[in-house]
Each structure stands twice: as C-alpha cells, then as structure tokens.
Image (tube, rainbow, N blue to C red):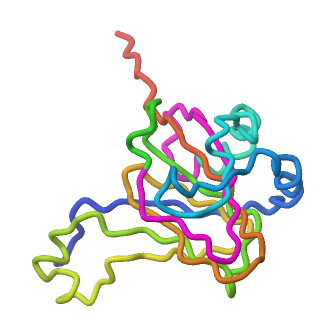
C-alpha cells in the first residue's frame, strides 16, 4: 500500500465578498506603492517597503478568521503580523522566495487574489523544496512536476507554510493583477490539565 511521506498542506478558500472588503484598497494605498527592483530579485509594485499595513491586522484577522480556522486547528492562536499589496502589470513577476527570514516570527503566509484574470494574469506557483526529488530521479519516475500552480480565481485566498518557496509567473498584460499578501504567527494554545 502506497502512502505519503511528510505531506505539506496548503489551504484555498473563496472570499465571496472580496470586492466589498478589498475593492478600494488599490486607490487608498496607491501612494504607498514603489517598485521592488533593486530590493527584491524581481520587478513588481508593492507597499511592502513602507512597512505600513494596508489593512490593520485586527481588521484583517476578523475578516479572515472563519477561513483560517478551516485550515488551522481550533486550539491555535492566529496573529496577523503584517500585510502588503503587490500590483503586477506587463513585465512584472515575482522570483521564487520564502518568508522564513522575516524579522518577526512567522510560520505561515497567505495571499488574497483581489484582482486576478486567470486567463491573462501571471500564475502563482509553489516550488518543490526538496532538490533531491529532482536530482535522484523521483520527479521523473513518477512524472511529478517540480512546480505546482494552484487553481485560483479572483476572490480566492491561499494559506501555506512560510518556508515553502513560491512566486508569480511573468505578467504579460496591463490588467492590474492585485494581491494582498500577509504573514501569520500561529501557535498552539497551552493545554492546562486539571487534576
């Protein structure tokens, strides 16, 4: 019987009211956008370098809590550490990266696809982090791609461990592909045993 070794789960959900909640973010935060070129190994317009949350953590947490607890166990505490907008137009892309070296402790990250045309816009992807899978032939033998592109649509949310490398394919159109990214500090609550 075949079984899996150490699978890594990510979570996808659809925010039905995403336009109502996040529809005005681009206009309200446009003045915070700057080009990442020279600071990241890519070119994208982002609010990340302003170090100002475009949505207050408490507000974002209250909106996302029902979706996050579909992924995380109910006995975990979830803290939104930070959030930022990324705006992609023609020529923009995001290099494969992870969020492990962020100054504050984070262990999970997420992306909300606020404006996203799945037929035109650059696709989000995960990379297989285990180079041994490719070098030793595992991916070839089992015909497994070293890259996974989750099937996402506008209004979707994905949450994943921060150590997983991820990126965005080349954006070929000026369609304002807009995402809200965020980092989480997720910790299990201490169980108090009464005797």
Above or below — where is 50 with respect to 110?
Answer: above
For the point 41% across and 22% down, which residue is it? Answer: 190
Q: Inspect the magenta stretch and tell me whether residue 91 lies in it.
A: yes
Residue 28, position in %: x, y?
87, 47
Residue closest to the eye, 37 or 116: 37
**Residue 52 location, quadrant:** top right
Q: Quadrant of the N terminus?
A: bottom left
Q: Position of residue 20 (x, y in %)?
A: 89, 56
Q: Quadrant of residue 4?
A: bottom left
- Asked if residue 151 lies in the magenta stretch, the reply is no
Q: Nearer the viewer, residue 103 or 59?
A: 103
In the foreground, 195 or 178? 178
Direction from residue 191 to residue 154 in the image, left or right = right
Residue drawn at (70%, 62%) of the image = 87
Q: Residue lying furthest top in this view?
A: 195
In the image, taking residue 68 as reference, residue 153 lies left or right, namely right
The magenta-colored residue range is 69-98
Q: Outermost residue toward the front?
A: 38
Residue situated in front as seen by the camera: 50 or 14: 50
Q: Is residue 43 above or below residue 83?
A: below
In what quadrant of the picture does the C terminus appear? top left
């Amino acid at each position: 019987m075949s079984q899996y070794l150490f699978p890594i789960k990510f979570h996808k959900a659809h925010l039905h009211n995403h336009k109502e909640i996040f529809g005005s973010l681009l206009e309200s935060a446009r003045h915070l956008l700057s080009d990442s070129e020279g600071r990241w190994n890519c070119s994208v317009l982002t609010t990340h370098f302003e170090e100002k949350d475009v949505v207050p953590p408490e507000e974002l947490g209250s909106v996302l809590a029902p979706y996050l607890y579909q992924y995380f166990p109910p006995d975990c505490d979830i803290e939104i550490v930070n959030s930022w907008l990324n705006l992609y137009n023609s020529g923009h892309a995001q290099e494969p990266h992870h969020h492990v070296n962020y100054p504050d402790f984070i262990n999970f990250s997420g992306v909300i696809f606020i404006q996203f045309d799945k037929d035109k816009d650059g696709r989000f992807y995960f990379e297989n982090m285990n180079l041994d899978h490719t070098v030793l032939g595992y991916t070839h033998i089992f015909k497994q791609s070293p890259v996974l592109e989750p099937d996402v649509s506008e209004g979707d949310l994905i949450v994943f461990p921060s150590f997983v490398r991820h990126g965005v394919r080349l954006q070929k159109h000026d369609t304002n592909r807009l995402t809200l990214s965020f980092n989480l500090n997720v910790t299990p609550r201490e169980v108090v045993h009464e005797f």
